[in-house]
Amino acid sequence: MDENWEVRSESERIKWTLDPFVGVGPLRFGMEAMEVSEVLGAFTEEPQQLVVRHLQDGRQIGETGRYWRFGLKLFYDPQGKLEGISFDGAIGPQVLVEGVALSGRVPSELERWMIDRANATYADDDFELWHIGRGIPGSSSLGLVINVQRVADYLVTRPVVFAEHVLDDPSNILPEEAWNITA
């Protein structure tokens, strides 16, 4: 993020639509890192930086791909398949779902939207709206968590989207950095 801590305006953001459990914009869950790099080459000249993730005993558990200037983190499973995407709330692409913009927003506004959506559509489903760790809201039907990040003295939304199998244990399948509040 630049030293001015600015959030890109809507007109400066690429807009991608979430297709729950399938992907977002041109990215599809199950893609390999090389495929992701090829697809994102149409949007940025920045190369993907891959970092291997390990358990304490040294076993590899996946990779994280980073596009710092484009505002994306990509999480790959141990077989090298895309299973999660985190969008930088200040500079990343705008994620749209059901016509609602999810990136760089006031967190309480989106949490209210998620609660209203769950009550209207999934009133009998105790598992539609849930919270991860530090009270971060998630939607089971969208494969989405509305995380936050710090921008100067404010918090803005940083959506995290993921493949369906991640719902089994999100805080352990995706790495901790997907769920941390970032600056």
Image (tube, rainbow, N blue to C red):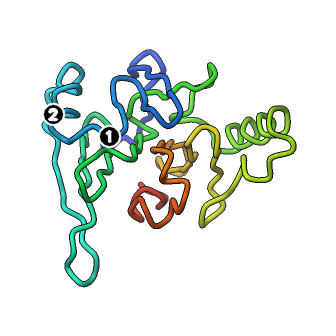
Locate residue 145 relative to residue 87 in the image: left or right. Answer: right
Label 2, on which residue? 46
| The C terminus sits in image quarter | bottom left
Q: Residue 30 carries which label?
A: 1
Q: How far apart are marks 2 and 1 (CA)?
A: 22 Å
Measuring from the top left, give residue 22's x and y in whole percent: 45, 32
* CB contact under 8 Å: marks 2 and 1: no
Amino acid type shown at disc 2: Glu
Instruction: Give percent across and percent down for residue 46.
Output: 15, 33
Query: At 80% from the left edge and 47% from the top edge, which residue is drawn?
Result: 125
The answer to which of marks 2 and 1 sits earlier in the sequence is 1
Q: Is residue 117 left or right of residue 138?
A: right
Q: Residue sitting at 17 percent across and 41 percent down?
A: 48
Vertical side of 76 occupied by 95: above or below: above
Q: Please name whichever residue, 19 or 86, is drawn nearer the observer in this view of the structure.
A: 19
Residue lying farthest to the top in this orientation: 11
In front here: 57 or 93? 57
The residue shown at (58%, 45%) is: 146
| 157 shown above or below 91 | below
* Number of the front mark, 2 or 1: 1
> At x 15% / y 37%, what residue is drawn?
34
Quarter holding the N terminus is top left
Q: For numbered disc 2, what is the local secondary structure?
A: loop
Amino acid carrying label 1: it is Gly
Mark 2 packing: few (<14 Cα in 10 Å), some, or many (20+)? some
